[in-house]
Image (cartoon, rainbow, N blue to C red):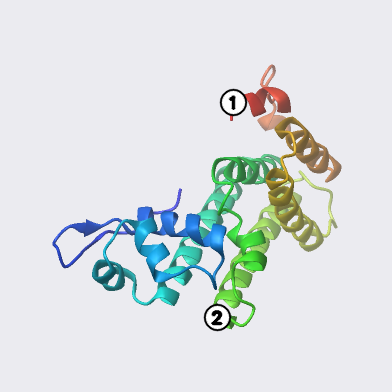
Amino acid sequence: MAKKTATRPSQSGDPVDRSAALRKVMDVLSEKGFAQTSITDLRKAAGLGYATLREAFGTRGDILRAAIRFCADTEATLAHEPLRVSPTAREAVLAMLEENVRLRRHWPRYCGCLFTVNTFIVPPDDADLQDFLAEKRRSLSKHIRSRLAQSMTEGELPAGVNCEAIANLCLTLLGGLSFRVLDGAPPSLVFRSIELFVKGLGFRVRQNHARPGAGRHSPPNRARKL
């Protein structure tokens, strides 16, 4: 999971929980947009005074950019984790896509920094922030590609598979899943679509990871647990 942003003391002596404040800022930012969100909106959302808010984050623009960066860092960490810890690439890709759906369902208003907020919230002339989010996507694509290449050497994927193209396809699907959840698509349908996609990638079952009776829950059962 993402590291909690450290707190820092305010002029009043009370620590400012930056993580909590930035999440609240993302709430109002996603609702009103970058241009229409005022410093008053941010103060009310964060529950801080003007002086404390400026001391902790800087100007209005600094606060908005910090919130988007925080959300993107959080999402990037959640996306990278399955690639790091899953025993097979099939399980890694499946878990990464499913976690993306769960993230959208729990934080539907402002999550999607890596894939949708870039379009809807970030001003097109904010080159630094656009580049930051684009680099996050490139980094995730690189990690997916590396995990797929590892699976090819282990015999889970056939030799000669275009890992870069598959990684790009996975990243594209992540963005599409965000829109489908926001559109209200049934979770069972979304999860079933993910399973069909992963099945179509041609992963071979690795016998040392196959366990009798350890099959995955069906998508509807998994959806009911969300």
Q: In the rendered structure, which amino acid carries the disc numbered 1?
A: Lys
Question: Which residue occupies 85% across, 57% down?
Answer: 160
Q: In the rendered structure, which amino acid carries the disc numbered 2?
A: Asp
**Residue 225 badge:** 1
* Residue 22 image point, x, y percent: 41, 59
Dividing the picture into quarters, in which one does residue 124 lie?
Answer: bottom right
Instruction: Locate residue 96 relative to residue 66 in the image: left or right.
Output: right
Asked if residue 50 shows in the view, the reply is yes
Q: CA distance from mark 2 to mark 1?
A: 39 Å
* Residue 169 image point, x, y percent: 79, 57
Instruction: Locate residue 22 relative to residue 117 in the image: left or right.
Output: left
Disc 2 is placed on an element classified as helix
Compare marks 2 and 1 and give the one earlier in the sequence.
2
Dividing the picture into quarters, in which one does residue 117 lie?
Answer: bottom right
Question: Which residue occupies 67% across, 56% down?
Answer: 144
Question: Which residue occupies 74% across, 30% down?
Answer: 188
Which residue position is annotated with label 2? 128
Q: Which residue is more in the foreground, 104 or 150?
A: 104
